[in-house]
Image: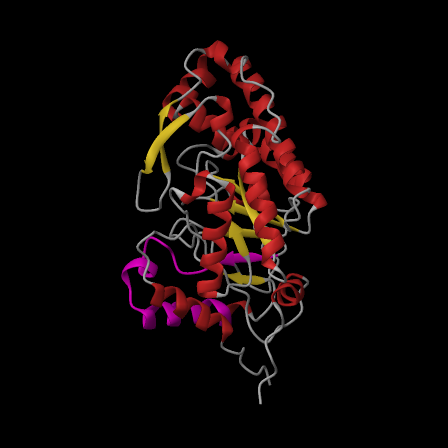
Amino acid sequence: MPSPRPRYRDLLDAVLSGQAAPVCPVFAHRHHPQADQTAAALSEATLAWQRRFDFDLIKLTPASTWQLIDYGVIDADAPDDSLGRRRIVRRPVVDPNDWYALPRLDPGFGFAAEILRAAAATARAAGDVPVVVTVYAPASLATKLAGADRLAEHRRDHPDAVAAGLATISENTCRTVAALAETGVDGVYLAVQTAQQAAHTSADYAGFALPGDIACLEAAQCLPLTILHLHGDGLLCALFSDRPSSVLHFDALPGNPVPQFGQASGLFGPAVSTGPSPAGGLQAGSAGQIFTEARSWVIRSGGSRFILAPGCTVPLATPAANLEALVAAARTPMPDPR
C-alpha cells in the first residue's frame, strides 16, 4: 500500500531541501479579473481556486497593475487579454523629469494596502498550504510606468533621470516586500519580466535592472520561500545563478535552457519550477496530453528540488480537466528507484 502523501508544507520543505519525496509538489495560478480590486474578493477568488484544484502552493495573483496604481497609473476596468491582465490607459512618466518626481510610497496606504489585506486574509485561511504573493520587479514596473519605447528613449537621452526613478521604484518595492512579510505569507513570487535577450544584452541588463532585482530578493530573505519568475523566451538565466531565491520558475519555451536535473549547471537556483507551457497544450491540448507531458517533467526531476507548474499565468479559458491532469501527474507516486 503506498505511503500517504506528505502534507503541503512538509512536502514542499522536503523537496526544496533535496530529499526524495513520494510525489511532486504542484501549483498553477491565474488572474482573477474584477475580483482583484478588493481584498475580500481577491482572497476569496484565490481560495476558491485552491479548493477547486488542491495545489501544494497558493499564489496570490493581484491585478497586473497593483503596484502601479499608487504612482498614478490608470488602468482599464476590464481585462485586456486572455490572461486577465489589465490595460494601462494613463502612464505617469512622460517627461524625463517625471522620473525624479516619482513618490516615496508607503504600502500601508492606497491600493497596495488592499493587497496586503488580501495577503493576510489568504494566509489566515490557507492553513497548512504555503502562500506566496506576486511582486513585480523594479525594471518591470519602470517599463509599465513609462511604456517600453519611452523608457528606451529616456535611458538613451536622460540616463540620470531614469536611474533616479529606478532607485525610487526599487526602494518602494523593497518596502512592499517587507510589508508583505508582516502579513503571515510564506514568501513572494518576484516577477522579472524584462530579462530577455530580445530586450537586453547581459551587460545592459546587469547594469540597468539586475541591482533592483537583487535588492528585492535580498529584502525577501526574511521569508522562507522566494520564487523568482523569469518571464518570456530567451531568458538571461546566467545573471541569476547563485542569487538569493528558493525556486527559479520559468516557461519551458524553445529559447530557454533546459534544466539538467541532478547536475550543477550554474544556470539555476536551488530548485526549479516549470512544466507544460500555458500558451501551448495546457490551453489547447487534451487532458491525456497534459498528463503525459507533465509526468515526463516529474520523472526527469528525480523527485527532488522540483515543483511542477505551468511556466506562467494560465489563460482564463484553460480547461479544468487539463489542470486536473497536471495535478494527477504530480500526485502519481514516483517510480521505485530500485
**Residue at the limit of the structure toward the right, as seen here:** 222
Q: Which residues are magenta?
A: 271-299
Q: Is residue 73 above or below residue 188?
A: above
On whether residue 280 falls in the magenta region, the answer is yes
On screen, residue 308 above or below 85: below
State the residue in front, 216 or 109.
Answer: 109
Residue 282 visible? The answer is yes
The relative height of residue 146 versus residue 331 in the rendered view (above or below) is above
- Determine whether 46 is above or below 204 in the image: below
- Image position, residue 191 (x, y; %): 51, 41
Left or right, 32 with respect to 236, comes to left
Front residue of 75 and 141: 75
Figure quadrant of the C terminus:
bottom right
Outermost residue toward the front in this view? 40
In the rendered image, residue 255, in percent from the top left (x then y), is placed at 40, 48
Q: Is residue 183 left or right of residue 231?
A: right
The outermost residue toward the bottom is: 1
Q: Name which residue lies at 64% across and 61% down.
A: 16
Q: Seen in the image, is 284 located left or right of residue 290?
A: left
Instruction: Using the rendered image of the protein, determine whether residue 189 is visible from the camera's viewpoint.
Output: no
Q: Position of residue 297 (x, y in %)?
A: 47, 66
* Image x and y of residue 210, in percent: 57, 33
Choose top left, top right, bottom left or bottom right for residue 303.
Answer: bottom right
Residue 285 on the magenta span:
yes
| Image quadrant where one finds the N terminus | bottom right
> What residue is at 60 percent from the left and 27 percent from the top?
172
User: Residue placed at 46% from the left, 11% from the top?
Assistant: 96
